[in-house]
Image (cartoon, grey):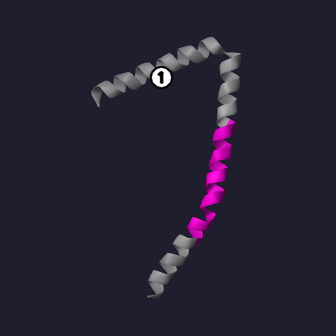
Amino acid sequence: MSAANSTISSIATELEKMPERVEDARKALDGFRSDALRMVKKYPGRSLLGAFAVGFVVAKIAKYV
């Protein structure tokens, strides 16, 4: 039973850390979003060309999958 208690304790510890990790991930994504918006505003033509290129590659991959 000691191994089971240890496992449950470690799972509980990880679950207690989960809100902090979610908050860190949210902050990182917000930073990425603001960087992306800044780049799109600064280089709108390049952004559209890049979006087209990514869409083209994804469509080609999806065609074969």
- Residue 30's place in the image compared with 47, above or below, is below
Which is the main secondary structure of the residues drawn in magenta? helix
- Outermost residue on the left side: it is 64
Q: Quadrant of the C terminus?
A: top left
In percent of the image, x 61 and y 11: which residue is there? 45
Q: Position of residue 61 (x, y in %)?
A: 35, 27
Q: How many marks?
A: 1
Taking the magenta stretch, the answer to whether it contains residue 37 is: no
Give the quarter of the image for residue 28. top right
Image position of 21 (left or right of 63): right
Give the quarter of the image for residue 27. top right
- Outermost residue on the bottom side: it is 1
The residue indicated by pointer 1 is 54
The amino acid type of the residue labelled 1 equals Val
- Residue 52's place in the image compared with 58, above or below, is above
Q: Quadrant of the N terminus?
A: bottom left
In percent of the image, x 69 and y 18: which residue is there? 41
Element at label 1: helix
- Residue 23's place in the image compared with 17, above or below, is above
Q: Position of residue 4 (x, y in %)?
A: 45, 82
Q: Which residues are magenta?
A: 13-31
Taking the magenta stretch, the answer to whether it contains residue 16 is: yes
Q: Position of residue 64 (x, y in %)?
A: 28, 27
Give the quarter of the image for residue 50. top right
Residue density around tag 1, few if under 14, some if 14–19, many if 20 or more, within 10 Å: few
Q: Position of residue 38 (x, y in %)?
A: 71, 24
In percent of the image, x 59 and y 71: which residue is there? 13
